[in-house]
């Protein structure tokens, strides 16, 4: 982690939970990024207070509005980030924003299927499309060979709940729309890895573990992982990733998971 030099990162859904902790831990590095773009739906609102507190101490933190289900909001965010970066590109894009809606096979609705897909799959697709020119610019400007998260990468925050071979925690909740969305996000990651490898961009799906956040605490059982430990794990794994990992599905400990 100490030798992991990332000049610029962007994290979606960064006002709470795993996204907020990723931002915090990058800012606290001995060699923090020159730019940390933390996006949230409402930068002026109360829900962004923790980010605003951080920004008052870290001038390299920029809070940017981004609603993952709104293409215009995503485009405006990309324009704003480009203005800050001037001639340099974006090294690391973390598609973290996501939702779960409680459901069983019997109670799942078309509305929730659509909303969860729009947020957890179409959102990361559109965000990646909008930031692609900046990721390409970072890759082109990097002297590093191969693929890496410090050169240019898309990290999609997935879930083992979307693994078909290793279907996680079925007995705790069916969450059908969520599981389907994460299986689809894994496929999106694979497609991105095939499409963007020639641009020098690495794509990876990461399962953060079952984590004590608002989302992770939405079942009656206690999630085993603190957000601090999960994010420390993820930040230890990212520097180890290279071309051989492009398009893979890994967990916060770097273990490859079955699709
Ligand atoms: P939280 O519910 O704690 O936080 C979710 C974040 O996503 C919030 O910042 C929220 O913003 C944001 N968000 C939700 N919808 C949108 C949207 N339409 N546009 C922009 N931002 C949005 O979740 P976690 O931190 O636990 O989860 C982060 C990621 O990790 C998710 O993708 C989740 O699926 C994944 N994950 C989490 C696990 C866990 O155990 N916690 C396990 C496996 C995967 P707002 O405050 O405005 O709602």
Image: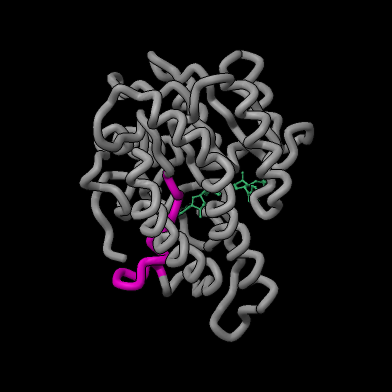
Q: Report which quarter residue 58 is drawn in.
A: top right
Q: Mostly what secondary structure, the magenta segment? A: loop
Using the image as rendered, state which of residue 79 and residue 6 is in the foreground. 79
Q: Position of residue 154 (x, y in %)?
A: 43, 43
Q: Foreground residue, 148 or 130?
A: 130
Q: Which residues are the magenta region?
A: 155-169
Residue 167: in magenta span: yes
Residue 1, percent across and down?
A: 30, 25
Residue placed most toward the observer, 159 or 248: 248
In the image, taking residue 63 as reference, residue 154 lies left or right, namely left
Instruction: Residue at 38%, 14% (x, y): give it.
Output: 30
**Chosen colour scheme:** one colour
Q: Nearer the viewer, residue 116 or 75?
A: 75
The reply to whether residue 52 is in sight is: yes
Please say whether residue 207 is visible from this viewpoint: no
Answer whether residue 232 is magenta in the image.
Answer: no
User: How far from the left and from the top, in percent, is residue 73?
Assistant: 72, 44
Picture residue at 27% right of the left edge, 58% below the top: 257
Q: Position of residue 200 (x, y in %)?
A: 34, 38
Q: How many numbered dots are placed on residues in this image?
A: 0
Q: Residue at x 35, y 29 (%)?
A: 150
The answer to whether residue 216 is left or right of residue 108 is left
Above/below status of 64 relative to 194: above
Residue with the most extreme left position: 244
> Which quadrant of the view contains residue 122?
bottom right
Q: Is residue 196 left or right of residue 69?
A: left
| Picture quarter with the C terminus | bottom left
Which residue is at 42% across, 66% downward?
Answer: 162
């Amino acid at each position: 982690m100490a030798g992991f030099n990332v000049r610029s990162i962007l994290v979606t859904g960064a006002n709470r939970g795993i996204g907020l902790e990723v931002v915090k831990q990058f800012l606290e590095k001995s060699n923090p990024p020159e730019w940390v773009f933390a996006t949230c739906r409402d930068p002026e609102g109360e829900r962004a207070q923790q980010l605003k507190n951080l920004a008052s101490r870290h001038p390299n933190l920029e809070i940017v509005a981004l609603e993952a289900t709104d293409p215009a909001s995503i485009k405006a965010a990309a324009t704003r980030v480009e203005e800050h970066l001037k001639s340099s590109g974006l090294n690391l894009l973390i598609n973290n924003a996501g939702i779960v809606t409680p459901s069983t096979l019997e109670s799942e609705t078309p509305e929730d299927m659509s909303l969860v897909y729009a947020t957890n799959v179409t959102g990361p697709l559109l965000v990646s499309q909008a930031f692609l020119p900046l990721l390409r610019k970072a890759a082109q400007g990097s002297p590093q060979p191969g693929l890496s998260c410090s050169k240019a990468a898309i990290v999609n925050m997935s879930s083992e709940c979307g693994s078909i071979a290793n279907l996680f925690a079925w007995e705790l909740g069916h969450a059908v729309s969520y599981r389907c969305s994460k299986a689809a996000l894994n496929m999106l990651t694979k497609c991105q890895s095939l499409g963007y490898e020639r641009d020098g961009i690495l794509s990876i799906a990461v399962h953060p573990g079952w984590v004590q956040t608002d989302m992770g605490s939405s079942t009656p059982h206690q999630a085993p992982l603190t957000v601090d430990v999960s994010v420390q794990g993820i930040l230890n794994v990212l520097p180890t990733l290279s071309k051989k990992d492009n398009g893979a599905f890994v967990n916060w400990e770097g273990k490859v998971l079955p699709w």
